[in-house]
Amino acid sequence: MKRLSILFLLLTVLMGGSYYALRLETVTDWLTITLTLAMITVGPTLIYFLLIKPKAMPKLWIYLSFLACLGAAYLIIPSSQKGYLNTILFWLLPVIEVSVVLIVIYGIVKSVRTYRSVETGEKLNFLEVVENALKPKLGNGFILHAVLTELSVFYYSLFVWFKKPSVNANDTFTYHKDSQIKTIVILFSVLIVVEGVLFHFLLQRWSEVVAWIFTVLNAYGLLYIIGLYNSVKFLPHVIGENYLIIRLGYQSSIKVDIHNIARTQVAETHSITDKVSKDTYYSLLTIDSPQYEIILKEPALMKGSYGKKTYVNSVVFRADDSRELVESIESIQLSNSNNMG
């Protein structure tokens, strides 16, 4: 608490003093340059030594603190004196952005290699390895899950084409073969490409920047749905000795303890317009018909993109061999019941 008070006081003096000094009647170029550099360098330095380092926060917060001080400097410096700041930003920001991206990529690759070199005894997919490797560096909050979501999109849309899904007939169950997801991906891919080309030329007449922003977003959307389809193939449902994992590609998943399953029943058919209950995890596309519903004894945690978490009381799913999956669940439950008896 003492460090936070000191940090607040020093930042107030720095920013407040700069605000006052830059509005004096006679402000020299030397003073403007000095105060500009002080706000974008001294501020982040104070935050690092008084907040980030003592609390062992992820180093990514250094970059965020720099952006915060940069924004504060932009608001504090009068419009007539922003020439020096604009010049600094023109050369500095691209260098910093590229450096941060390279550092993050290097850190991810290094962490994954280090983690894989340690014998964990677990069968983990690529993203689970990345999550376990990055958790000590990024924490377990929004930043980690945002990075994982974006990595999922690019990994499954670009880097898995020549890999074969690792599907073990004994403990994994696919759910993409009888799904409409392939049709949806093809349809939306064609629509995104046609729409992207058409609207790019239309928007270009109004604004070149807006046209390219729209095109980049369309390209990302195309990668997202392609990645989703590939992730559905590479991330099947999994049943273990005492657990069950139900997934919908990289979009969402839930891990359920077999002991927590009250019963498994045939799922009710719903139309596309029906409202989805917040207490139920629907692990399927809206246009696909559900097959089975798992009723839980106690709520279980469902994990979604960008760290979204929701406790649910039931799980609705489909699988290519759904009956076999249900029989496996019942077999484990019967075995556990006999052992307890």
Image (spheres, rainbow, N blue to C red):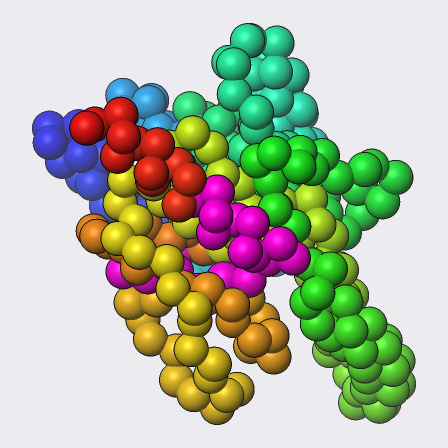
185 lies left or right of 44: right
Q: Could you say which is closer to the camera, residue 150 or residue 60?
A: 150
Report if residue 271 is visible in the image: yes
Which x, y percent locates residue 267? Answer: 43, 71
Q: Quadrant of the N terminus?
A: top left
Image spot of residue 124 (x, y percent) = 57, 28
Q: Quadrant of residue 188?
A: bottom right
x and y percentages locating residue 256 in the rendered image: 36, 44
Residue 315 among magenta residues: yes
Relative placement, left or right, of 280 versus 4 is right
Please name whichever residue, 218 or 284, is drawn nearer the observer in this view of the structure: 284
Work out which residue is located at the far top of the displayed protein and give it: 118
Give the answer, above or below, for where 89 lies relative to 140: below
Q: Quadrant of the C terminus?
A: top left
Which sits in the foreground, 53 or 5?
53
Residue 315: percent from the left, percent from the top? 39, 60
Q: Is residue 38 left or right of residue 155?
A: left
Q: Is residue 279 magenta?
A: no
Q: Residue at x 61, y 16 (%)?
A: 116
In the displayed orientation, state which residue is furthest to the left.
2
Task: Please indicate, yes or no, whether residue 22 appears anywhere in the rendered image.
Answer: no
Q: Which residues fall within the magenta stretch?
A: 305-329
Residue at (79%, 42%) from the top-left corner? 160
Answer left or right for 81 relative to 107. Answer: left
Residue at image location 82% in from the left, 72% down from the top: 186
| Residue beneath the point at 27% across and 40% down | 259
Q: How many marks?
A: 0
Determine whether 1 is above or below 254 in the image.
above
